[in-house]
Image: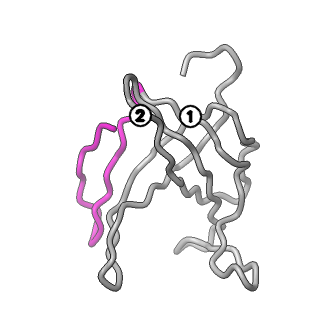
Amino acid sequence: MGLAIKESGPMRRIPVDVRGLEFRAVDDIAPKLKNRQTGEVKTNAAGVPVYELMVTVKGEGRRAELMSVSLPTHTPPDVRAGQLVRFEGLTGFFWESAGRAGVSFSAVAVEPVPEGAAV
């Protein structure tokens, strides 16, 4: 993945260059749960519900990897398991908590790639 680091407040937002990458939905898009026991849906700082999409990402000549992408929206797109998808505004952000660290991914929008269209 092509990454370029851009400072954004206390966190580092990393825009992801998606050229040459193929994303395929593993599951249907679903609400991201804040609490699995109560079913409470996670919201962002603006109170917008957050949805989650598990995808495989594959670059030319590379093996596929699994990643989760969060999408804050009031109206989730109709994305189904098995569909090729296209992201708009895909970013990663570094997090660290209780001695653990990682990168989480978020997008402004996601849409299915029409059958036969170029990825």
Give the residue drawn at x 34%, y 38%. Answer: 1
Figure quadrant of residue 39? bottom right
Position of 37 with respect to 104 (left or right) is: right
Is 16 contained in the magenta span?
A: yes
* Closest to the observer, 102 or 77: 102
Mark 2: which amino acid? Val
Is 6 contained in the magenta span?
A: yes
Q: Is residue 64 above or below residue 94?
A: above
Position of 104 with respect to 7 (left or right) is: right
Give the residue drawn at x 70%, y 48%. Answer: 27
Figure quadrant of residue 16? top left
Q: Position of residue 49 (x, y in %)?
A: 66, 67
Q: Position of residue 48 (x, y in %)?
A: 63, 67
Mark 1: which amino acid? Arg
Give the residue drawn at x 53%, y 53%. Answer: 69
* Quarter occupied by the C terminus: top right
Q: Is residue 70 above or below residue 90?
A: below
Q: Which residue is mark 2?
A: 18
Give the residue drawn at x 60%, y 51%. Answer: 54
Secondary-structure class at tag 2 = loop
Q: Is residue 85 above or below residue 96?
A: above
Q: Main secondary structure of the magenta part?
A: strand
Sequence-wise first label, 2 or 1 = 2
- State if disc 1 and disc 2 touch (CB < 8 Å): yes
